[in-house]
Amino acid sequence: MALGSLDLESTLMMRKQMIELRWILGTLSADLPFILLQFQANVQGSLNDLDSDVANATQNLSARGLEGDAAREILRNCFIAECK
């Protein structure tokens, strides 16, 4: 009999866990569009910053030339800005 009651307890525990899991998944699926929109906005913001930094570096390299210490400094500053 103890074995039968243990099986019943295990079954009830598994059902409870399944119900909890369904609730968690339902909550996540409700929040997922918002989470994805936030992620998209963050990625787009980073890409916009990168685009701006590269455009500025390109303009500065065009004015100062592609060789020498000035060019290295421009590229170094662009790289450092993106590492932040």
Image (cartoon, rainbow, N blue to C red):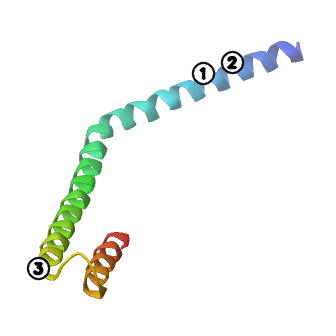
3 vs 2, front mark: 3
Q: Could you tell me which quadrant the C terminus lies in?
A: bottom left
Q: Which residue lies under the disc numbered 1? A: 15
Front position in the image: 79 or 8: 79
Q: Mark 3 points at which residue?
A: 63
| Most foreground residue, 37 or 51 | 51
Is disc 3 placed on a helix, strand or loop? helix
User: Disc 3 versus disc 1: distance between alpha carbons?
Assistant: 70 Å
Q: Which residue occupies 18% across, 76% down?
A: 61
The Cα–Cα distance between marks 2 and 1, rounded to whole angstroms, is 6 Å
Q: Is mark 2 on a helix, strand or loop?
A: helix
Mark 1 surroundings: few (<14), some (14-19) or many (≥20) residues within 10 A: few
Spot occupied by residue 75 in the image (x, y as percentages of width and height): 29, 75
User: Label 2, on which residue?
Assistant: 11
**Is label 2 in contact with label 1 (beta carbons under 8 Å)?**
yes
Question: Residue 48: where, in percent of width, then height?
Answer: 18, 60
